[in-house]
Image: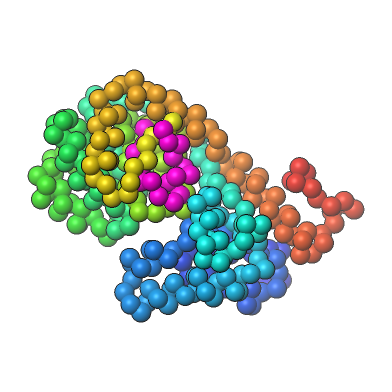
């Protein structure tokens, strides 16, 4: 495919493509989050060591002269920490939210908790299930709906059984877009106990749906949750703190409405049109920088893109 393209968007999702080694055309490295902790938790020795070296040692060397884009200030700081870029060559472009799809809806008649996403170990959904066991002591009619799929599902179902709350925890597996929108809008609280995120688009989608969020105070989620306007951030893995914040929202309808309204306002800051525009500016700047591109005799300025 050489000669057919003007620029490469090199998306690093753990293992880099190392495009600077075999392509001379302009390129942008897109990275959603640094994977050092994921490698450590996901793989065994020596695989995780090899993956860590690729990202933290070889990638900074290979991509040293390449423009970089990430999705949050947290990820930007993590990239700088491992030497994968400097403050001047990493731009942040937040993911957008399809505002026309996510709408506030009538809430369930019972206290409802929702997790929607992949069921992977580092998502720490077990923390939310254990918190639910504490919530049920105060709100016995509450229901925790878990939508999504992944390798951790069986262990999570077994945990709900061991805690004696299986009847109050519903595993839906994969759900359609229509069901997703319904769940996000009708739930009282969206819980996201992940150990790390690049951004956390699900919590912004929940906010756009008028649903309060309780999430881990970790990289990425610190950027996407407006604490305490759209929800609350609590220490990652702290079951009691998660339960306390969920109980607080369940017990105060005024607070629930306040977080709902605040979340809608917060989510309105993010749109795919804005994200596309910001990325288009970066692309044009890179084409200009590498090729001294002249359009109609004029250098393209940011405001012209």
The reply to whether residue 201 is in sight is no
Q: In this view, does 104 lie above or below 178?
A: above
For image coordinates 43% across by 73% down, the residue present is 51
Q: Is residue 253 above or below residue 211?
A: above
Q: Give the range drawn in magenta.
A: 212-228
Q: Position of residue 297 (x, y in %)?
A: 90, 53
Q: Is residue 117 above or below residue 206?
A: below
Judged from this view, the residue extending furthest toward the bottom is 46
Judged from this view, the residue extending furthest toward the top is 254
Q: Position of residue 262 (x, y in %)?
A: 45, 28
Is residue 143 shown left or right of residue 175?
A: left
For the residue pair 2 and 275, the one nearer the viewer reads as 275
Answer with the quarter of the image where residue 52 lies: bottom left
Whether the magenta-drawn stretch holds residue 21 is answered as no
Q: Position of residue 220 (x, y in %)?
A: 45, 49
For image coordinates 34% across by 39% down, the residue present is 214
For image coordinates 44% across by 40% down, the residue present is 225
For the residue pair 21 and 103, the one nearer the viewer reads as 21
For image coordinates 67% across by 68% down, the residue present is 65
| Quarter of the rendering occupied by the N terminus | bottom right
Q: Position of residue 53 (x, y in %)?
A: 47, 75
Is residue 204 shown left or right of residue 19?
A: left
Whether the magenta-drawn stretch holds residue 213 is answered as yes
């Amino acid at each position: 495919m050489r000669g057919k393209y003007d620029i490469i968007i090199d998306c690093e999702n753990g293992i880099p493509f190392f495009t600077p080694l075999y392509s001379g055309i302009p390129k942008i490295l897109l990275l959603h989050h640094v994977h050092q902790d994921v490698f450590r938790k996901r793989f065994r020795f020596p695989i995780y060591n090899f993956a860590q070296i690729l990202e933290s040692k070889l990638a900074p060397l290979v991509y040293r002269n390449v423009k970089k884009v990430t999705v949050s200030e947290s990820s930007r700081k993590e990239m700088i920490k491992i030497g994968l870029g400097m403050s001047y060559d990493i731009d942040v472009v937040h993911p957008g939210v399809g505002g026309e799809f996510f709408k506030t809806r009538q809430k369930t008649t019972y206290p409802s908790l929702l997790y929607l996403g992949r069921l992977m170990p580092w998502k720490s959904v077990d923390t939310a299930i254990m918190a639910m066991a504490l919530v049920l002591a105060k709100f016995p009619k509450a229901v925790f709906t878990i939508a999504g799929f992944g390798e951790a599902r069986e262990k999570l179902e077994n945990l709900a059984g061991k805690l004696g709350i299986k009847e109050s925890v519903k595993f839906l597996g994969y759900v359609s877009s229509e069901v997703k929108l319904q769940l996000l809008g009708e739930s009282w609280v969206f819980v996201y106990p992940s150990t790390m995120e690049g951004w956390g688009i699900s919590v912004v989608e929940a906010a756009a749906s008028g649903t309060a969020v309780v999430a881990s105070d970790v990289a990425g989620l610190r950027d996407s949750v407006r604490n305490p306007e759209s929800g609350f951030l609590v220490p990652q893995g702290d079951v009691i703190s998660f339960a306390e914040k969920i109980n607080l929202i369940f017990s105060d309808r005024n607070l629930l409405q306040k977080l709902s309204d605040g979340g809608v306002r917060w989510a309105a800051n993010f749109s795919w049109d804005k994200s596309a525009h910001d990325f288009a500016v970066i692309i044009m700047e890179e084409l200009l920088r590498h090729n001294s591109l002249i359009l109609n005799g004029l250098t393209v300025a940011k405001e012209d893109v």
